[in-house]
Image: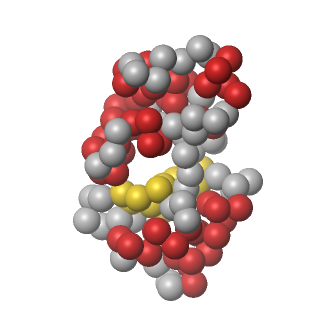
Amino acid sequence: MKLLHNPRCSKSREALSLLEERGINLEVREYLKEPMEEGELRELVKMLGTPVLRLLRQKESLVQTLELDLSDSDAVFAAIAAHPSLMERPVFIGKSGKAVIGRPPERVLDLL
């Protein structure tokens, strides 16, 4: 199991705490320090079972600065790969190969 984590994000810290409180053995990947490649992001979106836009923090000013075409999935994947701060967090990947975005943080418990 893996948590894609940003330690500066309160929701991400809450999700990590929920998992640790339950003694869950997991890998923690700080995706800002170790960004995901575009192929990894595509695989992650498959695990989430949602459109890539769900993984994008659409209200970030960088989305407007980049003039990102939200109807172009390839452009969205490329933008998140190039600018990992645009990725919604936290994301928990369970043993089942499914993933959830931990908003609210309690959603990570759905995959236990």
Report the side of 59 relative to 40 (left or right). Answer: right
Residue, far right: 8
Q: Quadrant of residue 51?
A: top left
Q: For the point 27% across and 59% down, which residue is it? A: 97
Residue 49 can be seen, yes or no: yes
Residue 56 percent coordinates (x, y): 51, 37
Residue 78 can be seen, yes or no: no
Q: For the point 64% across and 70% down, which residue is it? A: 14
Residue 108 percent coordinates (x, y): 46, 68
Residue 43 lies, with reference to residue 75, above or below; the image says below
On-image quarter of the C terminus? bottom left
Q: Quadrant of residue 87?
A: top right
Residue 1 lies, with reference to residue 5, above or below; the image says below
Residue 52 percent coordinates (x, y): 39, 36
Q: Quadrant of residue 84?
A: top right
Decide which of 108, 58 is in the foreground and name it: 58
Q: For the point 62% across and 75% down, which residue is it? A: 17
Decide which of 51, 34 is in the foreground and name it: 51
